[in-house]
Amino acid sequence: MLGKLRSRGHTFTDEEEQAEAVIVNTCCFIDAAKEESIEEILSFEERRKSGELKALIVTGCLAERYRAEIIKEIPAVDAVVGVTAIDRIAEVLEQAAGGRLTGKQERVVIGEKDPPGHGNAERVLTTGGHYEFLKIAEGCDKHCTYCVIPKIRGSYRSVPMEELVAEAQKLADGGVTELILVAQETTRYGVDLYGEKRLPALLKALCAIDTLHWIRLLYCYPEEIDDALIDVIASEKKICRYLDIPIQSGSDRILKRMGRRVNRAQIIELVDRLRTRIPGLCIRTTLIAGFPGETAADQRESMDLVRTLRFDRLGVFTYSREEGTPAAGFSDLVTARVMKTRRTKLMKLQQEVVRETAETLVGTTMEAVIEGRIAEDCDPENGPVYIARTERDAPDVDGYLFLEGVPRSRDLLSGSFVRVRVTGVNGYDLTGVLDDENESAE
Ligand code: SF4
């Protein structure tokens, strides 16, 4: 959307008071996301009513799913633009700002259902420049019983490989060194377009882009991780030893109710196989606490799986009942209090696992990318502390490595890669020092 707007001459500001128009890009995956989205829209209501803002537009999943409600309940919103209509964002913004969107129907801009996936010719980078996301597909065909995404985003549509490689090349030419592949699930990439899974081929093509240093894969569906994919990750140095594989529960009974296509034994076998074939692999997963019908015994199975498989990273969400999903019709709901307790128990257990795993890293040498520097006056005696990330940490969701004792004469730029020796553990983060003997700064 930013690319489309910029190509029409619009400019962007981080200062809300300076903005003449606001576009709120929303999520509605779970209740918490919906609440946050609505609060954000409402925070601009007064400014739009007073005329200080010329347009207030809502895009994203909440706009797609609750378009009629938004238009009816929040009159200050000029237009909602659905997930497959974002190519029209500049036109809608200009019409709204010019006062030309008046009828209810004009204010709801929804695109066609399941249009082919396409890359992004125009992009405005918002991540700071050295890492960037590459969306390789849209939609999902899995239909997990709790999930509303297939309804909102439609069926799985891969972006043609040549478009992705061209987009990645352009990002790399612009200074991006870490590319993060995303989709609602990345592992089925290519099935719709090429009749077979092509993620391994895509990864190989991306690895051939000279200046890319790390390629990271998020949202892998366990059932779809096959030997061809494992081989590529194991053999290509640029692919981070990091996989995000949501499993959602450790109980077969609940996995079945969730409509997940793997069972506990298959999850254990997969994690074992991955760790054997890709030494040092960092595995992130997510669990849902309190799915309808989940008993104390099911929770124990999830706890037991966390204890056994020792995931390197874990996110736990409490179950959110989403209208229009099969699970919304399940009557045996778990109370909010129990859900919260179960979530806390899982996270507490995970803290122990993380601490123990992190302690095994102390003394090892790893590569890390510099993210920034903490203001120098934090530690006037020892010089600046740099914030870095290892391949075990995805931006935003995982931890950091705090790099201490860097000589003042060394000015480490954001996005540069260095070798570090891990010296300690601090919660979910690590501390380290430059490993000058093995330095490989780029
Ligand atoms: S695989 Fe992920 S996006 Fe697809 S239906 Fe299941 S939870 Fe939703």
Image (cartoon, rainbow, N blue to C red):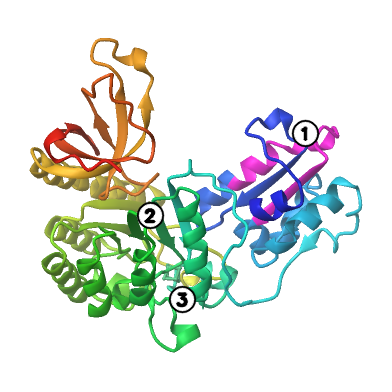
Looking at the image, residue 280 sits to the left or right of residue 389; the answer is left
Magenta run includes residue 210: no
Q: Which residue is mark 1?
A: 46
Q: Residue furthest bottom?
A: 195
Q: Position of residue 439 (x, y in %)?
A: 19, 39
* Residue for badge 2: 211
Which tag is nearer the camera, tag 2 or tag 3?
Answer: 2
The circle drawn on residue 3 is: none
Which type of secondary structure does the marked residue at label 2 adopt? loop
Write the residue at 10% across / 38% down: 362
Amino acid type, label 2: Thr
16 lies above or below 415: above
Q: Mark 1 and mark 3: span between their CA atoms?
A: 39 Å
Q: Respond yes or no on whether mark 3 lies under 8 Å from ligand 1.
A: yes
Tell me the residue at 19%/59% (across/down): 281
Rendering coords of residue 152 (x, y %): 59, 68
Amino acid carrying mark 3 in the image: His
Between 275 and 367, which is closer to the camera in this rendering?
Answer: 367
Q: Are marks 1 and 3 in contact (CB under 8 Å)?
A: no
- Crowd band around label 3 with a 10 angstrom C-alpha radius: few (<14), some (14–19), many (20+): some
Q: Earlier in the sequence, mark 1 or mark 2?
A: 1
Residue 178 location in percent, x, y?
A: 38, 52
Q: Residue at x 78, y 61 (%)?
A: 108
Q: Which residues are magenta?
A: 37-59
The image quarter containing residue 109 is: bottom right
Identify residue for label 3: 143
Q: Earlier in the sequence, mark 2 or mark 3?
A: 3
